[in-house]
Image (cartoon, rainbow, N blue to C red):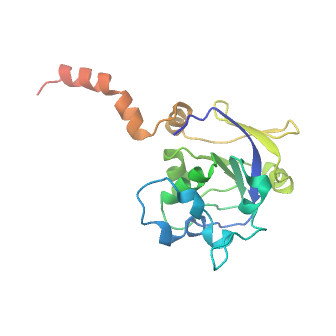
Amino acid sequence: MDPIKTLRSRTVVMPRTNIDTDQIIPGRFLTTTTKEGLGAQLFADWRYDAAGAPIPDFVLNRPESQGCAILVAGRNVGCGSSREHAPWALYDWGFRAVVSTEIADIFRNNSLKNGLLPVIVDEETHGWLVANPGAEITIDLESTTLRLPTGRTATFPVEAFARYCLLNGIDETGYLLGQDAKIAAFEARHVA
């Protein structure tokens, strides 16, 4: 996964509340163990009609959504069952951050472990984002701030270890592998 230090992008706004993981990536697509290609099924039941054709007015099918790396969602995004496929699908589509006033715990943790930054903001900041779809905003992970084009900033919480991993573009396994020399030195000092 790519390191995240600063994200500057236009936003895709999907203000629905309680967007659950089965809506993000329907269960019928969970048979894969690879992340590649899941972006094509992202929000499949909302994005495509019964014949599989794109629904033109769905937000991800609109030309202005292409290339956007930040999804602004309604309250309680990522609720429902635990599935890493949900952040995988968002990441594969091109999103690098999800912004909301409330993000479900398991989804938030799965996102952090898979290179997708969950950003929880206050109601006023969220309201501005919803009212201004496509606005270019900046998310700075180093300072944990989100900056609106108006100059207003909002801080957001992120756990220190997850922040370190995202800043360095590694997951937990990558972090442990990076500690190999220290682990070997410790084991050499503590021979059984």
Could you say which quadrant of the image residue 130 lies in? bottom right
Is residue 109 in sight in this rendering?
A: yes
State how many labels appear: 0
Instruction: Give the residue drawn at x 36%, y 34%.
Output: 176
Give the percent coordinates (x, y) of residue 22.
Answer: 55, 69
Q: Is residue 96 left or right of residue 66?
A: left
In this rendered view, identify the residue nearer to me: 113 or 3: 3
| 114 is higher (above) or lower (below) than 89 | above
Instruction: Give the residue drawn at x 52%, y 31%.
Output: 168
Instruction: Give the residue drawn at x 74%, y 42%.
Output: 9
| 145 is higher (above) or lower (below) than 14 | above
| 149 is higher (above) or lower (below) than 121 | above
Give the percent coordinates (x, y) of residue 156.
Answer: 68, 42
Q: Is residue 161 left or right of residue 49?
A: left
User: Given the current orientation, which residue lies at the most extreme left position?
Assistant: 192
Give the percent coordinates (x, y) of residue 72.
Answer: 72, 54
Is residue 105 in sight in this rendering?
A: no
- Assign the C terminus to one quadrant of the image: top left
Give the percent coordinates (x, y) of residue 29.
Answer: 49, 67
Could you say which quadrant of the image residue 179 lies in? top left
Q: Is residue 143 left or right of residue 173?
A: right
| 28 is higher (above) or lower (below) than 5 | below
User: Given the current orientation, which residue lies at the most extreme bottom position?
Assistant: 50
